[in-house]
Amino acid sequence: MILAAFKVDISSKKAELAVRLILHELTETPDVPVFLPMPTSTIGRRVADLALADSQMQLGVSDLARRAATSIRTISRIFPLETGLSFKAWRQRARIALAIDQLSAGRSISRVAADVGFSSTAAFSFAFGQVTKMTPTAFLHNLPILVVPPT
């Protein structure tokens, strides 16, 4: 639909209908479990950026707080207010979002599990299921194959 809506030779009426259908479908779509809300404050963004750069979770929350020049208490207060998630839940979701990106690129489940800092494939599968409500294998089987026609 998106490709159709932006064709060069599309009539304005057809483009309008396509965009209206896209918007309608988006409003009917349930929330995506891997949507990663970002904090809005300077401190929250700084912590989020540090956490995203540490995909293997080598830094604990105290290390992140120190590097962001803040406190653990501030992090635990800011994240629920600005993202709707505790810092722990936000970080887990960030790791799963990164994992989904890597799985979509064709990397193996075991490699992705290690790359995003899980101690085992089983631990990764459990966390993946908590966030997405499916296993990594089910995700891969349901992964749509997007073929974009040449322009």
Image: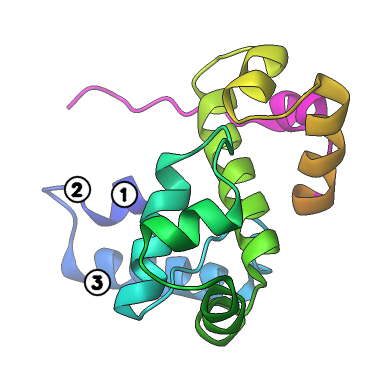
Residue 113 or 20: which is nearer the viewer?
Answer: 113
Residue 52 or 36: which is nearer the viewer?
Answer: 52
- Tell me if I can see residue 138 in this picture: yes
Residue 146 sits inside the magenta stretch: yes
Work out whether 113 lies above or below 58: above
Could you say whether the residue bearing mark 3 is in a helix, strand or loop? helix
Q: Which stretch is magenta?
A: 133-151
Q: Residue at x 19, y 48 (%)?
A: 7
Q: Amino acid at mark 1?
A: Ala
Tag 2 and tag 1, C-beta contact below 8 Å: yes
Q: Residue at x 35, y 81 (%)?
A: 41
Residue 8, image x, y percentages: 11, 48
Quadrant placement of the C terminus: top left
Q: Residue at x 50, y 73 (%)?
A: 71
Residue 23 or 59: which is nearer the viewer?
Answer: 59
Label 1 neighbourhood size at 10 Å, few (<14), some (14-19), many (20+)? Answer: few
Work out whether 76 lies above or below 52: below
Label 2 sits on residue = 7
Label 3 sits on residue = 13
Q: Amino acid at mark 2?
A: Lys
Question: Which sits earlier in the primary sequence, circle 3 or circle 2?
Answer: 2
Q: Is residue 72 left or right of residue 92?
A: left
